[in-house]
Structure formats: C-alpha cells, structure tokens
Amino acid sequence: IVSNANATAITIDSSENVTFSQNISSVNNLYVADDIGHAGDTDTYMSFENNYLGFYTGGVNTLAMNAGKVGIGTSSPQRSLQVGEYGTGNGEIAIASVNSGVGSILFGDSASGAALYDGYLQYNHSNRCIVVAAGAQDLMRFGAGAGTTLSGLVQVTNYGNVGIGRTPQYYGSN
C-alpha cells in the first residue's frame, strides 16, 4: 500500500505479517489481532488476548494486565498488584530515593486529607531507621496468624503503651 509515490507505508508479506514504515494516525480505533512487536527485536512485544494485555521483553512476560489486576514478573496476577510468580523464586519491590530522603509504603482509607495515608511503612535514609506507623487513633500490632485471626503478640497504642501477649494497659489501670 503506497501513501505517496516515493514511499511504501504498509507492507503485508506472504505470512500476512503487516509492517508499517511510517507513523500511524487514526481518528477512530485501530484494532490488531494478537501482538504488536518491533521488526528489529522480535522477542519484545505486546500481546493481546481475551481481557489480557501482556508486555514481553527478551521473550519473557514482564508485565501483565488481566481483569483489573496487574502482574510484574507473572502472567496471571491473583491480586490488584502482584510481583513475582508463586512458587518460582523471590518477589521483590525496590523503593528508591535519595540518600537524605525516605522510601514509603502508604496505607489509607480516604482519597484526601490525613486519612489518605493513615498508616505507613517507611525507611528514613538520613537516620537509617525503619518507621512503622498507624493513625492517631489506631493500635499497631505485630502478630502471627492469617487473615482476620491475627493474634497480637506485641501491641502498641498511639500513647506508646506496649502489651506483649495482651492488650496494652493505660496509665492507672491494672
């Protein structure tokens, strides 16, 4: 298919592979059958299937999106965000920042204000310390168990009271 007399814009070979040699613009939709790749790097591409979008580099599925879930290093994420494949090694997340900054994982229950990040896990590079924090009205627990049956082996109140194997007692209580 020729876009002008001097250049071929689209080539379709005998295997029905389509090659675009110029930019593509569309005012509506552009649909592809299975994959989008680069002619010079055949093991790096995007793959489309039923409700699935996969990104491959070096022939390995490095990022997958499926039914509202995102997987890094897995082709079948089971959670909203999953890093790594179950049973195949380590799943790691690196949070990088400058040596005078902090790296944080924030937990919130509101789209704005202080509840946007009620609790957090933070590494402070300047002080070389890890901070685990809960909101002002919350109890922080370190425990064992699963799901909602977590037993609080160590509990810390927002007042700094600590309970080991029991609920922390407040000043003046038994």
Image (cartoon, rainbow, N blue to C red):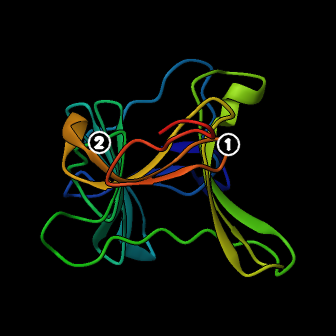
- Taking depth in this image into account, of 142 and 90 the one nearest to the observer is 142
- Taking depth in this image into account, of 55 and 139 the one nearest to the observer is 139
Report the residue marked by disc 1: 159
- Taking depth in this image into account, of 167 and 99 the one nearest to the observer is 167
**Residue 130 drawn at (x, y percent):** 63, 70
Label 2 Cα crowd, 10 Å radius (few <14 / some 14-19 / many 20+): few
Left or right: where 104 falls relative to 113? left
Image quarter of residue 42 = bottom left
Image quarter of residue 8 = bottom right
Amino acid type, mark 1: Tyr
Separation of residues labelled 2 and 1 (CA atoms): 35 Å
- Taking depth in this image into account, of 58 and 136 the one nearest to the observer is 136
The answer to whether residue 35 is visible is no
Up-down relation of residue 3 to residue 101 (above or below) = above
- Judged from the image, the secondary structure of the residue bearing numbered disc 2 is loop
**Who's the residue at 57% across and 42% down the image?**
157
Label 1 Cα crowd, 10 Å radius (few <14 / some 14-19 / many 20+): few
Left or right: where 61 falls relative to 70? left
Does label 2 or label 1 sit earlier along the sequence? 2
Up-down relation of residue 73 to residue 66 (above or below) = below
The answer to whether residue 115 is visible is yes
Left or right: where 136 falls relative to 29? right
**Who's the residue at 87% across and 77% down the image?**
100
**Who's the residue at 57% across and 25% down the image?**
109
Farthest residue toward the right?
100
Please tell me the numbered disc located at residue 79: 2
Image quarter of residue 44 = bottom left
**Residue 25 drawn at (x, y percent):** 63, 34
- Judged from the image, the secondary structure of the residue bearing numbered disc 1 is loop
**Residue 97 drawn at (x, y percent):** 75, 72
**Who's the residue at 19% across and 32% down the image?**
50
